[in-house]
Image (cartoon, helix red, strand yellow):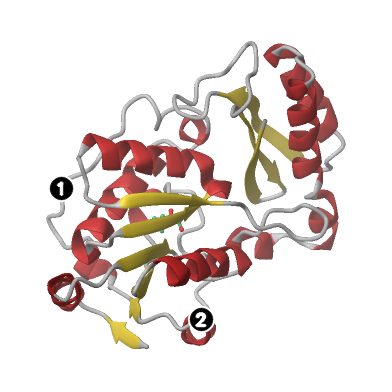
Amino acid sequence: MKIVRYVSLMQRTSQALQRRKRTLGLVPTMGALHGGHLSLIRRARRENDRVVVSIFVNPLQFGPREDFKRYPKPLARDRSLCSRERVDFLFLPTGHEMVPPGFGSHVEVEGLSDVLCGEFRPGHFRGVATIVLKLLEIARPSRAYFGEKDFQQLTIVRRMASDFNLPVRIIGCPTVREADGLALSSRNAYLDATERAQAPLLHQALSLGARMARRGRAGVEIRRRMREALGPIRDGRIEYARIVDPTTLRETKRPRPGDRVIAAIRIGRTRLIDNVAV
Ligand code: PAF
């Protein structure tokens, strides 16, 4: 596995692959890799000649009071996981390379960025879209892989790729879960034992919402029942629990197959998001 630290070297590497007509799969990450990331890497491995994983803790997507400073950075472990998964290139750009002094251009995906998580994390998706566009421009992959756990992020990246006619296929991959339903996330490491024990309630509430939707119940009733199901979490706060159209992310009154039941909660200091399809 080759470690690539410089944007210029990543660009040259990708150009050389294109000349040799080799496909490249990109798995963009912020590190602290878990089974969810590994499932993206394995799919990229199956579908492409070469695989690049990027690790960059993107400062643009964290708010001033968020966990940028304490975000986990187990780099040695991440490296060995990537090498075990036969990743070809590990792209590790510095903050200075990705966001140099004077950096001033940003991507705003209107209509999708200010709803759901965007209501609670202003500027978050602008930071995500800006860095994802840079990564796609630098690595020029044939395909890029994103987890469905971050469903809003996936929807925004798809929209951006389509709006800008980017020559890449955006591939959404199913959420990987613990045996009790909790979606794998780097932030699960923040949960203490009591919080961890309560965290599966999120997936249970979403599954309840999806079952109700399949039985034809109205969006407003589903929303109320999900909130009730999340109520018992001690030291918990519901940011949103809704059922939305998967493309527009607008709330649906009469749920249809393919809609997404989606929620964000806080347990203590940890923010958890998850969603399931109807
Ligand atoms: O999902 C993530 O880890 C990040 O939001 C991403 C896509 C790597 C952009 O920084």
Which residue is at 32% across, 87% downward? 2
From the viewer's perspective, is 135 left or right of 264? left
Residue 153, percent across and down?
A: 45, 43
The C terminus lies in quadrant = top right
Name the residue that disc number 1 marks.
Answer: 104
Q: How far apart in space, not on screen, are marks 1 and 2 (Cα)?
A: 36 Å
* Side of 275 where 112 appears, left or right: left
Element marked by disc 2: loop
Whole-percent x and y of residue 99?
22, 60
Reply above or below: 268 against 11. Answer: above
Closer to the camera, 62 or 175? 175
Residue at 20% of width from left, 41% of height from top?
Answer: 165
Q: Position of residue 158 (x, y in %)?
A: 36, 41
Instruction: Point out the tag, 1 or 2, that comes first from the N-terminus.
Output: 2
The residue that mark 2 highlights is 85
- The x, y position of residue 256, in whole percent, is 63, 20
Quarter location, residue 87: bottom left
